[in-house]
Image: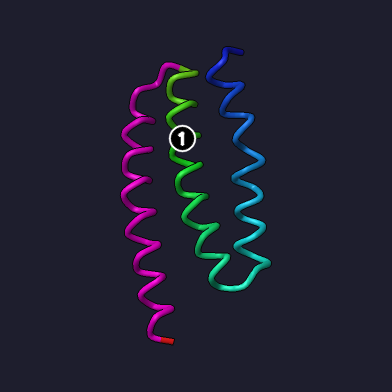
């Protein structure tokens, strides 16, 4: 186990906390937790890719970063209509 994998493991409780806030909290706090979960998941995938020396996971992380931003903006737009 190298430092990249330990760092990825250290970020995992933060992602789980964001999922819990998304499920249990009000809409505005859930949106903020969704944004943070997208960022943490992107960093998590990059650290895993470096830890296990698999470069295709970095492409997956970049796609996740773009899609989480687009999804969060779409969700905020939906909330604006309500």
Magenta stretch in the rendered image: 53-81
Q: For the N terminus, which image quadrant?
A: top right
Q: Is residue 45 above or below residue 39?
A: above
Q: Nearer the viewer, residue 5 or 30?
A: 30
Residue 57 covered by magenta stretch: yes
| Residue hosting label 1 | 43
Horizontal placement of 15 versus 79: left or right? right
Q: Position of residue 81 (x, y in %)?
A: 38, 85
- Residue at image coords 35%, 65%: 73
At mark 1, the secondary structure is helix
Q: Nearer the viewer, residue 41 or 29?
A: 29
Give the image quarter of residue 49: top left
Q: Position of residue 29 (x, y in %)?
A: 57, 65
- Residue at image coords 52%, 50%: 37
- Residue at image coords 38%, 30%: 57
Q: How many marks?
A: 1
């Amino acid at each position: 186990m190298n430092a990249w994998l330990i760092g990825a493991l250290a970020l995992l409780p933060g992602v789980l906390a964001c999922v819990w806030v998304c499920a249990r909290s009000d809409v505005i706090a859930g949106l903020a937790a969704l944004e943070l979960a997208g960022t943490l998941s992107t960093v998590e995938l990059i650290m895993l890719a470096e830890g296990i020396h698999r470069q295709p996971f970095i492409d997956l992380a970049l796609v996740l970063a773009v899609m989480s931003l687009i999804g969060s903006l779409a969700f905020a737009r939906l909330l604006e209509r309500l």
